[in-house]
Image (tube, grey):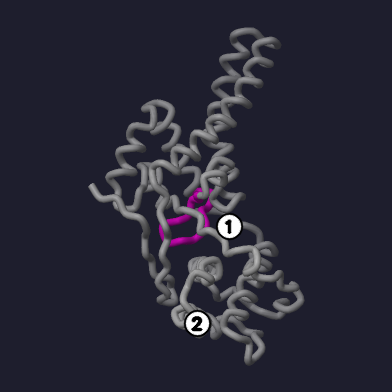
């Protein structure tokens, strides 16, 4: 049995990215919050169905709300909410692909279909055992979907937050050549940089910038490394919004 705190992956550009793994406690805090939300909504729906259609209506409403919670609610929030349901957001964790990319529709459907089996029918016992036994803290659904649950990185103090960059400044940038894993590496660096010593911080910024600059036509010469990375993320977000979310996981 092995229980680790982080998973290190390499992006296609050779940048080492450390993903802090979510532990059993935070994962079950998240599902407890989600269950409380789901059961509260389900109770209202079932009471209304029972008053309108009797026991049969209540039974049908129970089955529908169960599927809506375990599949619809979980998948909707994971795919559109950056890997976070309301419970995961409160617990400070999110779901990502095992390469660090955002979770997609297919992967979320797979992991939450397994959750229906692991959680509802077997009282989360298989999930507990596999999270504890897995070197990457994965339950069965995570293994099947190729996903990880990671802790959110604490943002820097308010005085250090990056200022919003006007879209016009990056309108001419072509970021199609920047992979999602590379963008994730940049985001994590920007989130954590204020906790680094000046030397390592500058070195990592230079490493990321030097490897990604050639992939981004339209960058003006002389832009400092960290400013380039900030602009890159703004341009990447603009590109994703224009193209729409991915269809699969």
The CA distance from mark 2 to mark 1 is 33 Å
Q: Specify the farthest residue to the top.
A: 54
Callout 2: helix, strand or loop? helix
Of 102 and 60, nearer the camera is 102
Of 20 and 108, nearer the camera is 20
The residue under the point 39% across, 70% down is: 10
**Disc nearer the start of the sequence (2/1):** 2
Discs 2, 1 touching: Cβ within 8 Å: no
Splitting the image into 4 quarters, where does residue 69 fall? top right
> Eyeballing the image, is 122 above or below 8?
above
The magenta stretch spans residue 182: no
The magenta stretch spans residue 99: yes
The residue under the point 59% across, 73% down is: 176
Q: Specify the farthest residue to the bottom.
A: 221
> Eyeballing the image, is 198 above or below 103?
below
Mark 2, Cα crowd under 10 Å, few <14 / some 14-19 / many 20+, is some
State left or right for residue 203 relative to residue 213: left
Which label was assigned to residue 202?
Answer: 2
State left or right for residue 200 relative to residue 173: left
Q: In this orientation, does residue 40 appear?
A: yes
Q: Position of residue 215 (x, y in %)?
A: 55, 81
Q: Position of residue 168 (x, y in %)?
A: 76, 76
Q: Which residue is mark 1?
A: 246
The magenta region covers 93-106
Callout 1: helix, strand or loop? loop
State left or right for residue 54 relative to residue 75: right
> Eyeballing the image, is 32 above or below 78?
above
Tally the marks.
2
């Amino acid at each position: 049995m092995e229980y680790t705190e982080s998973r290190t992956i390499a992006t296609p550009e050779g940048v080492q990215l450390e993903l802090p793994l979510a532990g059993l406690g935070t994962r079950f805090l998240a599902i407890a919050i989600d269950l409380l939300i789901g059961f509260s909504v389900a109770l209202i729906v079932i009471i209304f169905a029972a008053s309108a259609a009797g026991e049969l209506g209540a039974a049908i409403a129970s089955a529908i709300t169960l599927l809506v919670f375990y599949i619809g609610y979980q998948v909707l929030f994971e795919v559109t909410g950056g890997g976070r349901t309301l419970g995961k957001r409160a617990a400070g964790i999110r779901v990502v692909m095992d390469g660090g990319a955002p979770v997609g529709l297919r992967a979320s459907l797979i992991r939450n279909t397994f959750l229906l089996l692991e959680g509802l029918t077997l009282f989360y016992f298989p999930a507990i055992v596999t999270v504890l036994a897995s070197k990457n803290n994965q339950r069965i659904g995570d293994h099947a979907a190729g996903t990880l649950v990671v802790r959110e990185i604490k943002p820097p103090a308010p005085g250090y937050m990056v200022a919003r960059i006007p879209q016009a400044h990056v309108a001419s940038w072509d970021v199609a050549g920047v992979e999602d894993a590379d963008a994730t590496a940049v985001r994590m660096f920007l989130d954590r940089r204020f906790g680094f010593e000046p030397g390592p911080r500058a070195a990592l910024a230079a490493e990321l910038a030097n490897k990604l600059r050639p992939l981004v036509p339209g960058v003006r010469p002389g832009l400092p490394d960290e400013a380039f990375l900030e602009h890159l993320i703004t341009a990447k977000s603009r590109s994703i919004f224009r193209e729409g979310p991915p269809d699969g996981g």
